[in-house]
Amino acid sequence: DTEVTQTPKHLVMGMTNKKSLKCEQHMGHRAMYWYKQKAKKPPELMFVYSYEKLSINESVPSRFSPECPNSSLLNLHLHALQPEDSALYLCASSQVVLAGRSYNEQFFGPGTRLTVL
Amino acid sequence: SQKIEQNSEALNIQEGKTATLTCNYTNYSPAYLQWYRQDPGRGPVFLLLIRENEKEKRKERLKVTFDTTLKQSLFHITASQPADSATYLCALMGSSNTGKLIFGQGTTLQVKP
């Protein structure tokens, strides 16, 4: 199984709502990522989890809260978002990048299209 | 500061021709460089990876070159088909190997029948 799945496909939420995005992979990857992508822009890294521990937080506002409950699942909890947070949120997974290992192709999910009203 | 540049203008070519996309970078010493394809509204799909000690890599109709002196990678699609129409992203990992992948802006390729 070389697939990363994400739910929901689309999400519309108000600024006071709390919602969660979910991501799952069964490739045995121990690195998982959240990216944000605005229209006609490249994906921007938000968070990296390595062995279920947060290893990179790209100074993301606290209204985005990641969680990695186990090696197959990654969640992104959303609270008090702003309209400018509307974007495509992509989850990805890969083998863990270790010192001396020179590759980590990333497998992306289809994304969740988020609209904040 | 670190910068990755791809042609922001769309590349339009005729079916059957070779498409060549460029990725230039500055202030990086990447251990390797990757190319991804992204269709509208979908996640990127990995295509090829080339390491700093490799000059060229091929996969079917795809070829990637990596010139660490020029700080440039070229991505070629030979015998292009309309189904190759998509946005192509190059991505770099710094030699610190932190797991952080930085993407270029992407070049949109349109192959006309």
Image (cartoon, coloured by chain):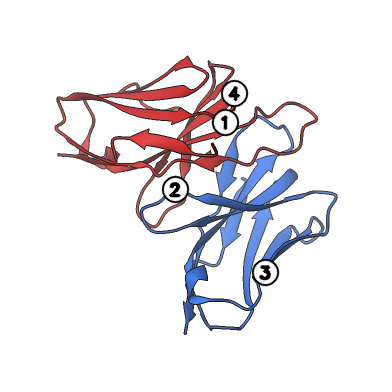
SS for dot 4: loop
Chain in blue, by letter, is: B
Q: Are marks 3 and 4 on the same chain?
A: no
Residue receiving disc 3: B61
In this rendering, would A54 be left or right of B34? Answer: left
SS for dot 2: loop
Foreground residue among A70 and B38: A70
In this rendering, would A35 be left or right of A39? Answer: right
**Percent of width and height locating residue B108:** 48, 67
Looking at the image, which residue is at 57% across and 44% down?
A: B102
Which residue sits furthest right? B53
Chain designation of label 1: A
Residue type at the position of mark 3: Arg
Residue receiving disc 4: A30
Looking at the image, which residue is at 71% across and 39% down?
A: A103
Q: Which mark is residue A66?
A: none
**Percent of width and height locating residue B36:** 57, 54
Chain designation of label 2: B
**Residue B9, relative to residue A83: is it above or below?**
below
In this rendering, would A56 be left or right of A43? Answer: right
